[in-house]
Amino acid sequence: MTENLIEITNLVKVYGKGEIAVHALRGVDLQVQRGEFLAIMGPSGSGKSTLMNILGCLDRPTDGTYVLDGEDVSRLRKPRLASVRNRQIGFVFQSYNLLPRLTAVKNVMLPLLYNGHQNLSDAECHERAVAALEAVGLGDRAHHRPNELSGGQQQRVAIARALINNPSIILADEPTGNLDTQSSQEIIELLHQLHEQGATIVMVTHEPGLAEHAERVIFLRDGQIVSDQLNGQRRKGGKL
């Protein structure tokens, strides 16, 4: 087992061709160790969303390599890429992305259903989803639908869903962007708890106060990493 969970080398992403080509990433090199908490920052158009999409196996690079947990996923076909995405990556989105007609526990179960239950029975899937909700402090909200939950509670459901397959990495894209200050604090404290339990977390954010909670911060500009620093100011459980 290698020390680096993620190894990216000379990553290039170009949208379009010729005069209308947009170079979203321009030769990015990046390594993320197992158990690391990394924040990605940068202005609009810097390439951070493109990088996040490639890290999440939602898109493939134009050039360069992306090795995830020892496997080069750069050129995988879409079905195989979808399998890697479902098994190894847990997503937390700014907008939660919960299905409104499903209860919290059924939303959390979805990744298990997408990969054929992992040889689990329906009852075992339900039990695992309830345990994931209990782990994020929502065991008593298992049968509530999203419209019956606060924004912070919906994001906790999304985090439980991200954890259900025991992923190699959690990708959090502006995880507190739609939340008030109190709910934001609760979510970042939950991310800290997951990190302290050994989770590898990569978080995209435009908020310096949120980035301070990561161990390491990289800053993108014009498709390139312009700074990569350890965050000496991070305080576990600190305030936003």
Image: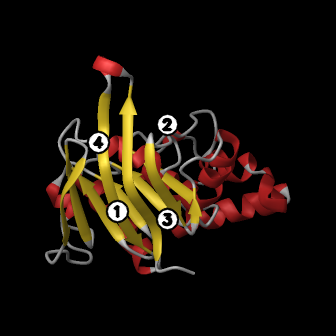
Which of the two labelled residues, at mark 3 and mark 2, occupies the earlier sequence position? Answer: 3
Q: Are marks 3 and 4 in contact (CB under 8 Å)?
A: no
| Mark 2 crowdedness (10 Å alpha carbons): few <14, some 14-19, many ≥20 | few
Q: Quadrant of residue 9?
A: bottom left
- Closer to the eye: label 3 or 4: 4
Residue at screen point 28% across, 18% down = 19
Q: Which mark is residue 47?
A: 4
For label 3, count other residues whose C-alpha is less than 10 Å away and answer few (under 14), some (14-19) or many (20+).
many
Q: Which residue corresponds to mark 1?
A: 30
Up/down of 46 relative to 123, above or below: above
Report helix, strand or loop for mark 4: loop
Give coordinates of residue 195: x percent, y percent: 41, 74
Side of 219 where 27 appears, left or right: right
Label 3 to label 2, Cα distance in Å? 18 Å
| x then y, percent, for residue 236 | 26, 78
State the separation of the CA atoms marked 1 and 3: 30 Å
Dot placed on the residue nearer the N-terminal end, 1 or 4: 1
Instruction: Choose the circle earlier in sequence order: 3 or 4.
Output: 4
Name the kind of residue labelled 4 in the image.
Gly
Q: Callout 4: few (<14), some (14-19), or many (20+) C-alpha neighbours within 10 Å?
A: many
Can you give x and y, in whole percent of width and height, for residue 50 in the image? 37, 41
Q: Which residue is mark 3?
A: 136
Point 38% across, 39% down: residue: 13
Label 1 – label 2 distance at C-alpha: 39 Å
Image quadrant for the C terminus?
A: bottom left
At x 18%, y 52%, the residue is: 207
Question: Where is mark 2, residue-wise?
Answer: 147
Of the residues shown, which amino acid type is indicated by label 3? Val
